[in-house]
Structures are given as structure tokens and as C-alpha cells.
Amino acid sequence: MKLFWPIDISFDQAIENLKSKNTFTPFDEEVLLFTQALSKRLVKMRQMPEVVALGYWLRKANIMGMQKEWNNQNKGRLIKSRGVVFHIAPSNVDTIFVYSWMLSLLAGNRNIIRVSSKEQSNELMDLILAEIARPEFEKIAKQTIICTYNYEENYGERISEICHTRVIWGGNHTVQRIRQISLNPMANELAFPDRFSLAVLSAEAVMNTNHNELNELLEKFYNDVFWFDQMACSSPRLVVWSGNQKEKAKVRFWSAFENKIKNKQYELMAATQVLKYTTSLWMATETDVKHIENGKYFSRLQVTDVPLEARERHCGGGLFFEYDVEYLSDLPKVIIDKDQTLAYFGFEYSDLESLVNSITTRGLDRIVPIGQALNFDGVWDGQSFLKSFTREVVIL
Amino acid sequence: MTIPYHLTKAEKAPLLLEKLNGLTNLHFEKSPQYRSMIEKGGFQITASQLEKVPFIPVQLFKLMDLVSVPKEEVIKVLTSSGTTGQQVSKIYLDKETSIAQTKTLVEVMKPLLGGKRLPMIILDTKSVLKDRKSFSARGAGILGFSNFGRKHFYALNDDMSLDIEGLENYLEEYKGQRILLFGFTFMIWQYVYKESLKKGYKLDFGDSILIHGGGWKKLEDEAVDASTFNQLLHDQLGIREVHNYYGMVEQVGSIFVECSEGHLHTPSYADVIIRDSLTFEPLQNGKQGLIQVLSELPKSYPGHSLLTEDLGMILGEDDCPCGWKGKYFNVAGRIPKAELRGCSDTFQGGVES
């Protein structure tokens, strides 16, 4: 067990402290000040765009918007925090734990966060620790534990016994593993398993863009794909083309995208290049795969179906399955439970709404314009954090 | 003229190209999977030069079974040595390919070992050979090299301890004779050299020649390079002549062995091409990149042209001071593992710590 916060006391002592003060009410003033203080620091981390995005999400206007919506939804209701929320953060998308923690804190909870041991020293953590140590945030500080431990130690069991909500990030394997640890019967649980995401483009809309519009689209698509090396669950891995000018649109889009990546000086790695080459040849042996093309910056695989296995074989790092449909309404037949985010370009709300209504599987939780695939939100995988992190008390 | 290191570039390239094109055609016809890769990837079956022969990554053999003969013709399955839990390569051999491998290995080693079978010490345990139908890389290597020796003695007991008594008796018996030593680089380092050092065994292998392979990865972690290795083995064990070789279970037989100058050489049956590790474009001599290995042997599986994950550099061609012709090169180790970020694997992060 290593405690990042609090410092200089034992885990047992930290657990005692956690309960020493009342929980916050939702959107408490001290919490709002804390989120703003963090936001100001985070947006300055220019070299880490995902951290800047987190800072931007925490900015005053956004949090106030969230508060306003919250107040509207809960007018006349008595809402309290749940108590202790246990967050198990993923090892690789290092900003996730902050989103999870901040939403829980805004709901008023005490928080215990297990971060991955890989994150022993990182700038984001250092910055958070500096901020939480400030005297004006003493109450938050007392109600927060940030730690890491090996799974062989029994801390996961201990925390699961006392928490009121358990949040499991980190994919199927982690979810299955943590679910074997018995949870306080009073607690609820949010689990975030492996997901798969896609983009859909209207070929006509791509052909109708002028140079600047296309560039802007590609900039956004680049961010969606490469901020996390196409390994975030919401990064598009399948690109669906609809409409009549698909072949022309593909040529226009991909050749410009190649230039975009080149200009971004995206850092390629030998192992990833070999992995993409290997995956594409492996996939080529499937009848659903019609054609493969391995470029320096990305690989493209033309497919006629996207079975679950293909989704699971995807290696990230710039590999795209491409699937053609005549109309957007032809898309639902390939959507499966695992599918999370659909990033779109060139469609109207009504098209997208009827798409959602005609999906018969559990698939698709977010439908966002290209460029917002990675934007974290208070509703994720179909669940509202603030709702899950609070409880309603009824007085009759 | 030293066969099979006798062909110059102009002589070798057309001969090898014809054989490799033949193999691409053969596997295209016999392996539906290979055919799909070639067709859907838009590769040329008949290449106009060696650099254009289609190549597939070695890792594919870990992901799928690639075979170009009916299963009933398979007489042996070779597997790579991956660490526990890792997927292993499976290489299917029929009689023809297996025989060709054995024959070629003899040819490749002849210039170093001569035509006569030498007394042979295998710096490993006999237990790696237990299963005769399925071989690990270590087992396959030992079995292949055993043909060069007689009176085989295994220097390690089943528990990996050094059979010092047996070893001393053996050396006494063959005193004054040239002895062939064979083993895997890491095994020799860990269980022969280090063990001797720890226990204070002073051995003298006399007029012996050591052939070893299997890769330097674990020794690199201990900052031991080839010259340190050779020197320490000389000092502690009295081994005077050491030749490393570069080979892999995916291309047994046509291995690349070090000449007297310490350079890995390509025999006439095989070749290497160095490719840019990001674009896979062929590189000039003197530039480091990914090693592609070509071999005319694999007929039962499509392994005649493989992209490895090893980095290497061609030092020259046809002009090595040792007198052997062909490309000569070095191997600099493996490319670093991909560490892509992603939403998954909280659990693994926890266990590794």
C-alpha cells in the first residue's frame, strides 16, 4: 500500500479521518472552489492535451452549467451524497480518475481512489497533491484518500466493505476480477468494461467541404483517434461511409488525413507498426475482410461485416476498419452491445435519433460530432454519475 | 571458396529470387490463409527482386496456424520458447522440410566444424527433448546440432545444476581432442558460467569450439555484450573459440553464424534485408532497422520471407575480411514493446508492481 494522499499517516488513520466530518451537500462551495483552482492549474499543462481538456471540463462555466441542470432536475427533492465512493482507476488513461473523483465530490461524497501503480510519479498527480494540500481545502483533504496497492494485499476487500458506491474502470478483465471481491450490501456499483467505438461520415458532406472545413474535420478526427493512440474506448476504430460518392470521399479524406498526421509529427513506434501490419494480415484471412492497405501512418481494412471477434482483434495505433452503407439506416445491423460512441459528420439530429431507435442491441451510448469522441461527460456508458453518486431522501 | 558462403551478390540474388518466388507461389496455392493475405494485401506473387518478395511478420505464427501441407503429412511441430502465459509460435514441418533443415544446417556449419563428428557437450539438460513430436526452440536447436557431434554429454542435470563430476570425467576422457560445445546463450550464462563462478569450479574445455544462440535479451539486462561474454567464458572455462548464431524456430536450418571476425553471415540458402522500422522500406548497408529473414527451406509453412522484431545492420556484402561471401551483419536486439495507452488493464498494472 502506498498512500499518495494523505501524507505521513497510516491507511487506518486516513480511514478514521475520512469519517470525522460531515459529507458535503451536492455542489458545496468549498468543492466548487477546489474544482476551479484545479481547473486553472490543469489548463496550463499545454504539453498534455488530455489534461488541458480535463481542466477545461472543470472550468467554472461548465461546472455551473452542470449545477444548474442538477438544480432543475431535483427541484423540491431532498438529495444527499451516498457516503464513501471507491474509485478503481484505469492504468492508462490517466485523467479518468480525476473525472470520476470530481463528479463524486460534486455529489458530496468522501472518496477513496486506487490509482494504478504505474502512475507513481506524474505531473498530473503532483499538481493535484499540491492543490489539495492548501489549507482552504482542508475538509476535502480529510475526505480523500488516493492510494495504490497490489491486488494480493487485501485493501480492495477492506475498502469494498465500507464503501457505498464502487466504480470500476479498466475493462472486462478488471471488472470481472473486482466483482469477485464482495461489496458492501448497501453499496451500488458502476462498472466500465471494454467498449468499441466508430465514426460515420456522409460521403457527400465530405465532398462538399472546402479546404478549410476539411482541415478542421481532420483536426478533430485526429484528436479523437490519436490522443490516446486509438486505445481509448471512445476512439473511433471503425469508419462507416454512407452515401453515393464513397470512393471519391475516401480518397479525399484519407490522403488529407495522412498529411494531417505527418504535420502533427505524431510519433510512430516500430512495435506499433509491426503490430498494425500483423493485425491487418491476420484479419485478411477472414472472409469479412475484402482488402487491406498498410500505410506509414495508418492501416485500412475494407470489411463487409464487423463481428465481435474483429472488434477484439483491433490493435489500436491507427488501424481502421471501413464499412460501407447506402444510408445511415443500414448501420444498425452491425451495431452490437459493445459499441459505445458514434462520432458523426454530415448528419442531422433526426437521422441520428431514428438510427438510435432502430438499434435492437444494447449498442451505442453516445452519439457526438467528430471531435468530441473523447470529451468526458457526466453521463457515460449510459449512466449518470451524479445520479449514481447520490440518493434521494423522501419525507412525507 | 567456402561453401555455402561462396556466392557473390550477382550470383546469389537471381538463384535465391527464383526459389523464393517459387515458394510464394507454392504457399499461395496450398495455404488459403497465406493466399488471402497476398491477394487482399495486393502483393506480387512473382517478385522482380529480393526486396519485393512479400514478407509476413513472425508474430503471425503466434496468432494462427499457418500450414501448406495436409495435417497428416506433418511429422513435427516446433514451438517458440515464450515466457509463461505468452502465446507461442507453432511451426508445422513435413518430412521434406524437416530433412532439408537438417541437411542445410550441416552445410552451414561445415566451414566451422569440419566434416568429422566431434565429441560434443551440450550445455543444457536432456529433459528438453522429452517429447519427440513437439519441440521447443531449445529442443529443436539441440536436436539439430546433435548431428555434428558424437558421445553427447548433457552438462546440466534436470534441476539445472551443473553435473560437474560428469563434466570433469568427460573432459579428462577427451583431453587433447577438439570438443564441440553447444547451448543457448542465456542458459550458458546462467547455469554454466555463473554457477562455475559461484561454486569456484575451474574448468578447462581445452581445444573446444562453442556454438551458441537464442538471443541476448536477458544478458543485455545484465549489461553483458558479446565480447564480455566471450572473454568471461575464456577466463572462467577456458573456452577459446566462440561462435554465436542468429536463428529462429520459424526458420530452422538456414541459420546465420558468426565467422572468425565475429560477423553473422548469410549462407547461399538464406538472406537478410534490413527495413526501416516505421515504413518497412529497405535500407542501405550500414543503417539499422528491422531484420527480414529469407530462406529457401520452408515448404510446409509459409515462412520463407519473414519480418522479425529484431533490429540489425548489414555491415557489408561479399567483402568480409574472413573471406566468406554474402551479406554479413549484426543483431542489436529487439524493438521496444509497444506501450499504447488505453482504457483497459487496471488489473495488470496492479500485479506488475
Image (cartoon, grey):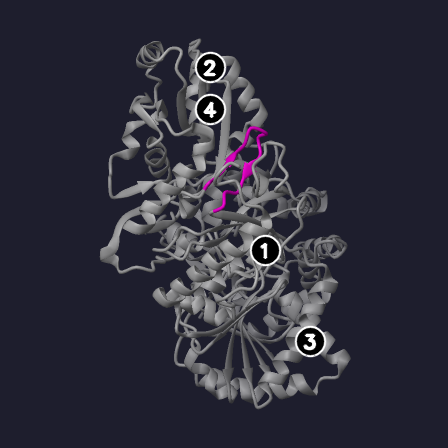
Q: Which residue is mark 4?
A: B189
For residue B185, above or below residue A261: above
- The reply to whether the C-beta atoms of the residues labelled 2 and 1 are less than 8 Å apart is no
Of marks 2 and 1, the one in the foreground: 2
Of marks 3 and 4, the one in the foreground: 4
Query: Upstream in the sequence, badge 3 or badge 1?
Result: 1
Q: Amino acid at mark 4?
A: Trp
Measuring from the top left, give residue B95's x and y in whole percent. Answer: 28, 50
Q: Chain of mark 3?
A: A
Distance from the alpha carbon under mark 2 to that under mark 3: 67 Å
Q: Which residue is mark 3?
A: A217
Measuring from the top left, give residue A215's x and y in whole percent. Answer: 73, 75
Of marks 1 and 4, the one in the foreground: 4
Q: Which residue is mark 2?
A: B237
Q: Amino acid at mark 3?
A: Leu
For residue A179, above or below residue A280: above
Q: Are marks 2 and 4 on the same chain?
A: yes
Distance from the alpha carbon under mark 3 to that under mark 1: 35 Å
Distance from the alpha carbon under mark 2 to that under mark 4: 11 Å
- The reply to whether the C-beta atoms of the residues labelled 1 and 4 are less than 8 Å apart is no
Write the start and end of the magenta stretch as one range.
B255-268
Of marks 2 and 4, the one in the foreground: 2
Q: Amino acid at mark 2?
A: Leu
